[in-house]
Amino acid sequence: MREDLISYLITDPKYYSNDLILFKKNLEKALKTKKVNMACFRDKTSQNHKELAKVFVDTCKEFEVEYILLSEHYNLAYELGANGVHLTSNQFDDIQKAKDLDLYTVISCHNFTDIENAQKKHINAITYSPIFDTPNKGEPKGISKLREIIRSYEDLDVIALGGIVNEDNLKLISKTKAYGFASIRYFI
């Protein structure tokens, strides 16, 4: 397996909680258990989003996570001292705004059109998904499609996302030239 595969943790209140103390405890457990180069606070439902985001950023700094991102909210990422943002596939117009704040910028891509658009806007990295079967995310792309994307966009950092839950999934991804893998459930 490739040792240099970037390991990208993404949070979800379903697994991490929106209680500040429990959230920090669950995040610390994940960061102690698995290697994490990159982490993203993703929470679309909690009322205490900003407080949770601050706990996330501070905890990731304690654990010396290299890339600390917030999902969607680039201004909040900048305000809280995160060094990046993970934009949704509906936020292509926000790439330059995030980059103007000197944030490491990742965007979710699901097809060639998304990837072309991201590349033209000089994105730092993309996630390509879903690779494997994932609840409510549509038909999985699979490893051969991931390889095709990586070959077609050699100068772009492609992070595999979706349905990555175990070492078998990682072995398949590591045989591609993916920059890394991202997951919620793998780190739980």
Image (cartoon, rainbow, N blue to C red):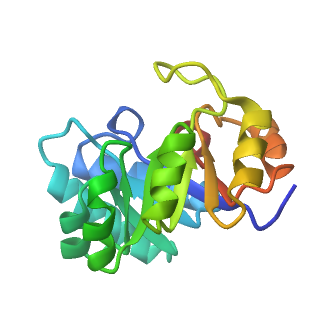
What residue is at 39 percent from the left and 63 percent from the top?
A: 69
Residue drawn 57% across and 41% down?
112
Q: Nearer the viewer, residue 34 or 82?
A: 82
> Residue 148 location in percent, x, y?
76, 43
Q: Position of residue 164 (x, y in %)?
A: 65, 37
Please identify the quarter of the rendering in which residue 168 is found: top right
> In the drawing, does residue 51 fall left or right of residue 102?
left
Left or right position of 43 against 185? left
Residue 152 in picture, x, y percent from top left: 72, 52
The one nearer the camera, 123 or 131, is 123
Residue closest to the eye, 31 or 142: 142
Q: Quadrant of residue 76?
A: bottom left
Which quadrant of the structure image shows residue 13?
top left
Q: Is residue 28 visible?
A: no
Residue 170 falls left or right of residue 107: right
* Residue furthest out toward the left: 47
Instruction: Using residue 122 as the reference point, say whether residue 101 is left or right of it.
Output: left
Q: Number of labelled discs?
A: 0
Instruction: Write the residue at 23% across / 54% down.
Output: 52
Please identify the quadrant where the N terminus is shown.
bottom right
Quarter in which the C terminus is drawn: top right
Residue at the image point whose x is 73% and y is 35% from the top: 145
* Any part of residue 136 in sight: yes
Residue toward you, 160 or 64: 160
Image position of 93 with respect to 113: above or below: below
Q: Where is residue 130 in the image (x, y as percent from the top left)?
A: 58, 32
Q: In this view, does 146 lie above or below 176?
A: above
